[in-house]
Image (spheres, rainbow, N blue to C red):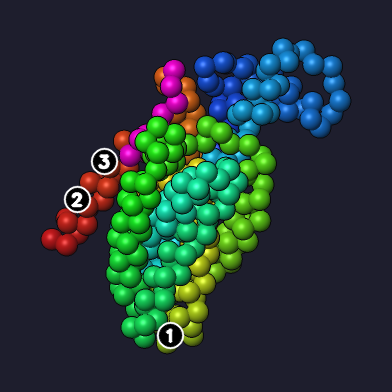
Amino acid sequence: MTRRRIPPLAVLAVLTAAAGVGALCAGRYFVGVRDVFGVLASRLVPMEPAWDPSVEKVVLLLRLPRIAAALLIGSSLAVSGATYQSIFKNQLAAPELLGVFQGACVGAAAAILLGAGPFFVQGTALCGGVLSVSVAILITRLFRSDSSAILVLSGVIVSGVMRSVLGMLKYAMDAETQLPSITYWELGSLSDMTFRKLLPIVPGVAAAMAVLLAMRWQFNLLSLGDDEARSLGVNVTVVRGVTVACATMLTSCAVCLSGTIAWVGLVIPYFGRLLVGPDSVRLTPVVAFMGALFLIVVDTAARSLSGVEIPLSILTGLVGAPVFIGMLYRQRRNVR
């Protein structure tokens, strides 16, 4: 008699839901599970509240937007990372590969320097990330090449330029009022998240995610090499262009909401491959749930471990750096 295995996607969906409920409860102000479900149910069905009014504010206004943002951002960074790694045939590729993070930081820094409000900072960060990748693609076109190696090198060039521009903007900032804002933004945080900030980003993320999920079977063909993919009927230039554009949109939307959160796009696809293998058809939806689960847990820890909220990139770095060393060791062993 054979045992039926529970699909990993179902397990991850349950774990993500459980982590979301736990995140609504956990924090410096603990809320019981019964009160959490009561508050959520009261939004759907009229009922007499049996909880303190402050509980409703904590759950609905402070924690629920953060959890929704963590779901959106974690899945976006993880899927974009897995996409980059598939189409560039390099497990060490990450969303920041084409200068998205650096471009978004430049856009945010320029808005902060001009004294703009949070929504303008969010918009310029999104534009900065998209602009960086557009320049990298333009450089590739100047070489009249559709090689992924040339695109990666173009991204390195753009990243270097953006770092220099960011340095100049930070040098021009007021050290007391403006510089701390961009420094904290570079480390990533969901501390001031609201649904008003989150909702405008949802359509772009949903569209890009839908395209990548629909095209994910072609990632397997690209991993065979450009010539082999062409012989199987894949338009390599179009597929790579569309997937890079969608992955960039996911990363830019994530970064404009939370600032730069490092390692998620590198580490989560690695664990996803350990769980379901390199097949992009299975890997892409799995890493979406894994990324969401990971960032919910990290954000809950960031606001619960100490009296002062810890920037997210500090915690993700504590996880990501050892995993990265392990990845390098495995690649070195495989080469031998």
Q: How far across and down, in percent of the image, does residue 330 sit?
A: 22, 53
Magenta-drawn stretch contains 59: no
Q: State the residue position of label 1.
A: 230
Quick one: which residue is furthest to the left in this view? 336
Which residue is found at the position 62% from the left and 58% from the top? 204
How far apart are the alpha carbons under marks 2 and 3?
Answer: 11 Å
Which residue is found at the position 61% from the left and 39% from the top? 68
Residue 90 visible to an observer of this rendering:
no
Q: What stretch is highlighted in magenta?
A: 307-317
Quadrant housing residue 81: bottom left
Q: How far across and down, in percent of the image, does residue 226 sit?
A: 37, 80
N-terminal-most mark, 2 or 3: 3
How far apart are the alpha carbons under marks 2 and 1?
Answer: 33 Å
Query: Callout 1: few (<14), some (14-19), or many (20+) C-alpha neighbours within 10 Å?
Result: some
N-terminal-most mark, 1 or 3: 1
Q: How far across and down, in percent of the image, does residue 14 sit?
A: 58, 38
The tag on residue 329 is 2
Q: Is residue 240 above or below residue 67?
A: below
Locate residue 72 relative to residue 251 in the image: left or right.
right
The amino acid pointed to by label 2 is: Tyr
N-terminal-most mark, 2 or 1: 1
